[in-house]
Image: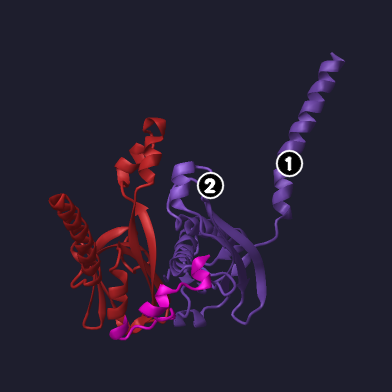
Amino acid sequence: MTSRSTKVLLGIVSLFAGLAISVANAQQVSGPVKVVQLTGFAGVKDNAKGTLDVQNGQLHFVHGKTSSDISASSVQDVVTGADSQRAVGGTIGLMSMAAPYGGGRVLSLFRTKIDTLTVQYRDADGGLHGAIFSMPSGTAEVIKKELLTQGARTTAAPEPTPAASSSPTKEQKQ
Amino acid sequence: MNRVLSAWTTLCLFTLVFAASPLLAQKDKPAKIKAGALQVEMIQSDEIKLPAEFQVALYENLIRQLGKDGFSRVYRDGDRNAASVGDLVVLHSTVRGFKAGSERARQVTTVSGTTSITVHCQFTRPDGTSLLERDVNGKVRFFGGNLKATYDFAKKAAHVTSENFSAAQGTGVL
């Protein structure tokens, strides 16, 4: 009896520990982050996969052997968002649509959470550009903070304090 | 014999009328407005709460589609080079309606989860003289992510532009 309850207790503790570690890992991102450049970054094709990093006042996007940079001080606005994407995507995801008895549709229910990072910046002529990146959940906010510390600006309201976030606003409830 | 002849005459008359009607309709079309270059202002969404990624995707897709639709000189918001261009047309876009929809709902049900955006497009001269105003919408009904609605809008807006404005020859600035 005692050994059974101990096992259950151990199971619960390890489950919570696992959750806590994964949250901590998501928030402590250091170095380049794997991203997908959805659109807008000058000289880079849409949906290009690469890594994003903020160093020496520059936002670096490395795609294959090419590297594109924009100065953090030229960033007019940086906004993060949350979204989700199909867990099974690409060609396999497309082929699964033909699966009998709606099997493909069931696969559509399995989705992974992602973050989006939207950056608006000006080029040397003053022209406004916008770039959208998608990245693993929990990483966009870190890049945003790094950009802000290195001279970027944002129009988004600052992140709410933990006390405030525990009581959702009327707008969030809707 | 007379009956056959009259039938032939009637057929010929009908053919003539049908063939002539598109030609007459083309004559009714108003003349295109001359545009030395286009300047695209950033999408405004004061009344409607639009996610930043949609705002940027609308702007970037619009610039790209206008360039593809024969306008070789498309300037971005704030580009200083646009000031010296004669016959400049400025495109102001304001979001009038937005339904976020859901990619998951589209994939699972096919009939629900449509994403739609309605944008009021106003073409003016740099002094503010209005040339043309149109509401253009973008939708994604079945396949693709929510941001695909911005691509649909951009294609339609570029079509409206090429129908009403004639592009002058010149070097492209994007």
Task: Pick whichever, B78 or A8, lies toward us.
Answer: A8
- Asked if the residue under mark 1 is in contact with the one under mark 2, i.e. CB atoms within 8 Å, the reply is no
- Tell me residue B173's x, y (percent): 42, 71
Three-letter residue code for mark 2: Ser
Query: Chain coloured purple: which letter?
Result: B
Range of magenta residues: A148-174
Question: Which chain is home to disc 1?
Answer: B
Residue at screen point 21% across, 83% down = A56
Q: Nearer the viewer, residue A42 or B21?
A: A42
Q: Which mark is residue B112?
A: 2
Q: Quadrant of the N terminus of chain B?
A: top right
Residue furthest front in the image: A1
Task: Determine whether the residue tagged by mark 2 lies in a helix, strand or loop.
Answer: loop
For the residue carrying disc 2, how many other residues have a C-alpha within 10 Å: few (<14), some (14-19), or many (20+)?
some
Res. B8 mark = none
Q: What's the residue type where badge 1 is placed?
A: Ala
Q: Color of chain A here? A: red
- Image quadrant in which the C terminus of chain B is located: bottom left
Q: Residue at x 57, y 72 (%)?
A: B92
The mark closer to the camera, 2 or 1, is 2
| Pointer 2 or 1: first along the chain | 1
Camera-nearest residue between B119 and B67? B119
Q: What element does badge 1 sit on?
A: helix
- Image coords of residue A95 (percent x, y): 34, 37
Q: As drawn, which residue projects farthest toward the left?
A: A3
Q: Quadrant of residue B22?
A: top right
Residue A127 falls left or right of residue A54: right
- In this figure, which residue is indicated by the disc labeled 1? B20
Q: CA distance from mark 2 to mark 1?
A: 44 Å
Tell me where residue B124 appears, x and y as whole percent.
Answer: 62, 74
